[in-house]
Image: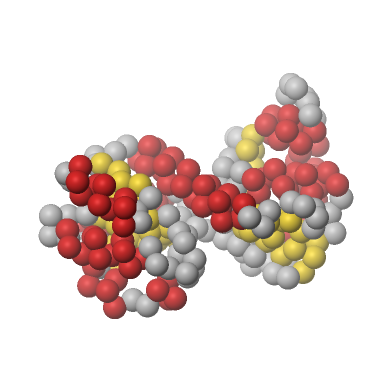
Amino acid sequence: MQTSILLVGTTERTASIKEVLLNHSYTVVELRWQQLQQERCEQLESIRMIILLHGTDSREEMSEGIERLAQKSKPVPIVVLTYQAMDEEIVHWLDLGANDVILEPVHSSVLLARLRNLLRLFVSVGQMDEEVIVVHDLKVNLRSRRVSRAGEYLMLTPKEYELLEYLARHVNEACTRSMILSEVWGYEFAMDTNVVDVYIKHLRVKVDKGRPQKLIHTVRGVGYMLHT
């Protein structure tokens, strides 16, 4: 399942950011400032991140938007993109509930890295108390080592579970085969083995087979990723 990001701003401001996000497999929902005021918070429950595009004509809307969106029943990271802002404005936005303020122009690779970092943090913090990692409809219970998807418990071998837990702890990150071999199998160096590929194949059968939304993805030339 692709991560859904809400962009709020004028068409001119959202166009370039939207293109970057779409090119990196995110789903983008766009709203103008006026539309945001009319949108009910519960209608945004599928959103995993909100990016507010600040302009000289949106100063008042920015503060109101941050304050309103920060009250969502399911917290998601709120990012402000701005070409120009005074220190007092940045502090005000952060105090209202924004999680990051990024000054433009910013290279797309830096922007994407900061977005990925926030998504990881929110997955980790959101599950810390219950020690359950949730990725879409997949639940990995770190205490009981039980795994379910859409309420259906999955029967995993000990090594399949360890591999899935590792991917879940690094959700939305590309994990190389050598990293997986080191962390899951304890190998200290890259070995000429296809054991990772074999176990990923087993996991795909149990986690993704027959489901319209696939969670385990191949990152060509790199390794694998559990992607929300």
Determine the residue positioned at 25% across, 41% down: 103
Number of numbered discs visible in the structure rendering: 0
Q: Is residue 29 visible?
A: no
> Of residues 118 and 111, which is closer to you in this image?
118
In the rendered image, residue 217, in percent from the top left (x then y), is placed at: 63, 49
**The C terminus lies in quadrant:** bottom right
Determine the residue positioned at 30% across, 46% down: 101
> Of residues 188 and 140, which is closer to you in this image?
140
In the rendered image, residue 108, in percent from the top left (x then y), is placed at: 35, 40
Q: Is residue 105 visible?
A: yes
Image-based side of 34 in relation to 42, left or right: left
Q: How is the image coloured?
A: secondary structure
Determine the residue positioned at 74% across, 56% down: 141
Farthest residue in the left direction? 57
- The part of the image, by quadrant, that contains residue 64 is bottom left
> Of residues 198 and 130, which is closer to you in this image?
130
Image-based side of 148 in relation to 37, left or right: right
**The N terminus lies in quadrant:** bottom right
Determine the residue positioned at 31% across, 53% down: 95
Image-based side of 155 in relation to 23, left or right: right
Farthest residue in the top direction? 189
Q: Is residue 49 above or below residue 174?
A: below
Q: Is residue 47 above or below residue 91?
A: below
In the rendered image, residue 154, in percent from the top left (x then y), is placed at: 80, 61
In the rendered image, residue 78, in percent from the top left (x then y), is placed at: 37, 55
Image-based side of 3 in relation to 110, left or right: right
